[in-house]
């Protein structure tokens, strides 16, 4: 579980770095928008994990869309465990 928490920390650190760049620099290229979108999607997915998989410093109340992702992840994990 600690390995997952460490990867979540890395993902969220990258997301925050991209957010800082976004505020300071926006070249308007397709690659830039892809990077920003990738960082946002990765952070959203990380926050969709069950709370026990998040580092303590990142615990927060998910928004309603994240609850839907959590339900889907748990459903898929349940299907995988049933195989």
Image: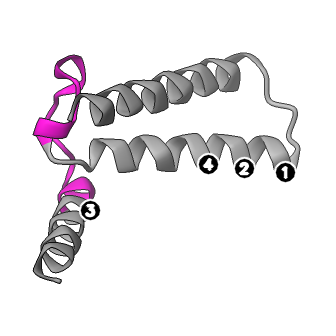
Q: Residue at x 87, y 32 (%)?
A: 27
Please give the range of residues in magenta.
Answer: 51-67
Mark 1 vs 2: CB contact within 8 A: yes
Residue projecting furthest to the front: 83
Q: Residues within 10 Å of mark 3 (few under 14, many from 20)?
A: some
65 displayed left or right of 43 = left
Q: Give the mark, 3 or 2, whose residue is nearer the N terminus.
A: 2
**Which residue sits furthest bottom?**
83
Q: Secondary structure at mark 3?
A: helix
Closer to the chain start, of discs 1 and 3, is 1
Compared to 25, does 61 lie above or below?
A: below
- What label sits on residue 30 in the rendered view? 1
Q: Which residue is mark 2?
A: 34
Q: Which mark is residue 40?
A: none
Look at 19% across and 38% down and name the residue there: 53
Residue shown at 59% from the left, 20% from the top: 17
- The residue that disc 4 covers is 37
Q: Which mark is residue 69?
A: 3
x, y (%) of residue 81? Answer: 14, 73
Q: Are marks 4 and 2 in contact (CB under 8 Å)?
A: yes
Q: CA distance from mark 1 to mark 3?
A: 27 Å
């Amino acid at each position: 579980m600690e390995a997952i928490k460490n990867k979540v920390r890395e993902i969220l650190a990258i997301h925050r770095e991209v957010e800082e760049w976004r505020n300071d620099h926006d070249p308007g290229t397709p690659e830039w928008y892809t990077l920003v979108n990738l960082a946002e999607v990765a952070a959203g997915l990380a926050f969709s994990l069950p709370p026990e998989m998040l580092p303590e410093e990142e615990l927060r109340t998910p928004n309603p869309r994240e609850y839907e992702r959590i339900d889907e992840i748990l459903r898929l994990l349940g299907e995988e465990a049933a195989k």
